[in-house]
Image (spheres, helix red, strand yellow):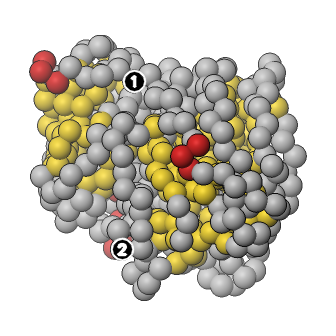
């Protein structure tokens, strides 16, 4: 029942338990997360790794020689991390999709002062929801994310859901020459359109890595789109499988099994959990693919290893639902939020968190200042003020021809309807708004605080498309 990694990254990173967390390679055998009083140390630092043909020296990670690790927590068990910044730039760490106390959300100015060079910040929270989440900086976001600082955060169910292997794929691009040198991380042209795409597509910093899982076993694949711009179109070829969770949460409404003809849409910030039944023949491969402009690309593959376990998808009990409050739609108030180009120029200041020097985008016809708005700046008030406990419908309207994955911190919502397509009503923290699309989503404003609300195409976030919603 042990799953080993064959890909180039890191070999066997020893698992160690710290404050309810466990760091692992992307695949793991069944173990339980441990707990202690010591916060998990996360040192933001320069890293060296061969993503292209030659090693790149100035990646950003939490270890010197590979990607930020998968952090595994247990639902309902306290977690603590001490984030130490060793870079000359400021930073702050955000736990994407986790419902937590506002003070732990890692958004500069809105929830904390940015972490300077040599400084640390202690984060602690108890994850109430199981599922696949991720972590990334929310200050100097463009530079630090593009250079590597994105990691998968897994919250394991309180009860073991019965898989034989669990493989997390951190999907992202890097903008590198084959020689390993950086290309410009972003461009004004990209920022004003769909973002600037990478040159090398990776899973866990590797091109087309191979993982192992038991022959005939049941694998949980956790896909996390942590790229700054790319919308993945994933599917798994040639084996029985089913989608079991989206954006962390078990499905309320089924999602069709993605295929090459009808792949899933996984935009920046989103996650998809897939159950796959491994082939019954040892040595056979399962291909994790993405549709791509020039034809399909393989993201990773999984090799069947050992004698067949002969398991069936039907043996899997449904994942237990997370405890999300159901909005009262008959009494819900509607808040309009309009996403478009900016009506006026002028780069808003973004304190210590870096500005791209442009504004191209707006929410409610106003450009907003980058990684987060400072609530103390005149004119930078909340986009909406919600009363604690009230049910609200957010009407998200895209007035631009570009797609925007719109993300809300601290709360989860579910789509009600779209003017363009049928959307499953699954809980999420990130809704992809297609060209000219209007999506209504519903939520209960049960978590007080100022919650960042932004497009997860980071060049859009940094050039106007980032505000916040206040829950009183
Ligand atoms: Cu994934 Cu505001 O972030
Ligand atoms: Cu977030
Ligand atoms: Cu956008």
Residue found 54% across the figure and 36% down from its top: 317
Q: Secondary structure at mark 2?
A: loop
Determine which quarter of the picture holds residue 457.
bottom left
Q: Secondary structure at mark 1?
A: loop
In the picture, the disc for residue 261 is 2
- Front residue (pair 404, 72): 72
Find out if the beta carbon at label 2 lies less than 8 Å from the nearest ligand 3 atom.
no
Q: Residues within 10 Å of mark 2 (few under 14, many from 20)?
A: few
In 3D space, how far apart are the residues under numbered discs 2 and 1 (Cα atoms)? 33 Å
- Front residue (pair 201, 177): 201
The correct choice, above or below, for 439 with respect to 192 in the image is above
Q: Residues within 10 Å of mark 1 (few under 14, many from 20)?
A: some
In the visual, does 415 lie left or right of 270?
Answer: left
- Residue 102 is situated, as x and y percent measured from the top left of the image, at 47, 23
Quarter of the picture containing the C terminus is top left
- Residue 269 is situated, as x and y percent measured from the top left of the image, at 45, 50
Residue found 61% across the figure and 30% down from its top: 157
Of circles 2 and 1, the one toward us is: 2
- Front residue (pair 416, 244): 244
In the picture, the disc for residue 208 is none
- Residue 318 is situated, as x and y percent measured from the top left of the image, at 50, 36
In the picture, the disc for residue 324 is 1
In the visual, does 305 lie left or right of 439?
Answer: right
Residue 387 is at least partly visible in this image: yes
């Amino acid at each position: 029942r042990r799953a080993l990694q064959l890909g180039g990254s890191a070999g066997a990173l020893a698992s160690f338990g710290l404050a309810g967390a466990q760091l692992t390679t992307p695949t793991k055998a069944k173990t339980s997360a441990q707990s202690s009083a010591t916060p998990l140390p996360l040192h933001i630092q320069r890293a060296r790794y061969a993503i292209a043909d030659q090693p790149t020296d100035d990646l950003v990670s939490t270890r010197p020689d590979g990607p930020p690790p998968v952090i595994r927590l247990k639902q309902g068990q306290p977690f603590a991390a001490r984030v130490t910044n060793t870079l000359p730039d400021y930073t702050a760490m955000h736990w994407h999709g986790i419902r937590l106390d506002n003070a732990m959300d890692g958004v500069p100015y809105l929830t904390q002062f940015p972490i300077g060079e040599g400084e640390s910040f202690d984060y602690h929270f108890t994850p109430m929801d199981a599922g696949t989440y991720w972590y990334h900086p929310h200050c100097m976001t463009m530079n630090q994310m593009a250079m590597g600082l994105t990691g998968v955060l897994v919250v394991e169910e309180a009860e073991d859901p019965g898989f034989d292997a669990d493989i997390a794929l951190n999907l992202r691009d890097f903008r590198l020459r084959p020689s390993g040198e950086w290309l410009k991380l972003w461009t004004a042209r990209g920022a004003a359109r769909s973002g600037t795409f990478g040159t090398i597509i990776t899973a866990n910093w590797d091109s087309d890595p191979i993982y192992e899982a038991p022959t005939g076993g049941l694998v949980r694949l956790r896909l996390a789109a942590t790229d700054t711009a790319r919308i993945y179109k994933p599917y798994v070829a040639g084996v029985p499988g089913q989608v079991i969770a989206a954006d962390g949460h078990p499905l309320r409404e089924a999602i069709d099994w993605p295929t090459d003809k009808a792949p899933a849409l996984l935009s920046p910030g989103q996650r998809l959990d897939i159950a796959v039944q491994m082939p019954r023949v040892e040595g056979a491969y399962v291909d994790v693919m993405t549709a791509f402009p020039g034809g399909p690309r393989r993201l990773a593959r999984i090799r069947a290893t050992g004698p067949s376990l002969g398991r069936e998808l039907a043996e899997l009990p449904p994942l237990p639902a997370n405890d999300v409050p159901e909005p009262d739609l008959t009494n819900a108030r509607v808040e309009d939020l309009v996403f478009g180009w900016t009506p006026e120029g002028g780069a808003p200041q973004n304190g210590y968190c870096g500005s791209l020097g442009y504004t191209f985008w707006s929410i409610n016809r106003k450009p907003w200042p980058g990684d987060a708005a400072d609530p103390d700046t005149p004119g930078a008030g909340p986009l909406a003020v919600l009363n604690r406990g009230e049910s609200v419908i957010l009407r998200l309207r895209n007035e631009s021809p570009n797609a925007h994955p719109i993300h809300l911190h601290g709360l989860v919502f579910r789509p009600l309807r779209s003017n363009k397509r049928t959307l499953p009503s699954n809980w999420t923290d990130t809704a992809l708004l297609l060209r000219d699309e209007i999506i209504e989503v519903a939520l209960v404003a049960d978590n007080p605080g100022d919650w960042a609300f932004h497009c997860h195409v980071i060049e859009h976030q940094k050039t106007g498309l980032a505000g916040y919603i206040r829950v009183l």
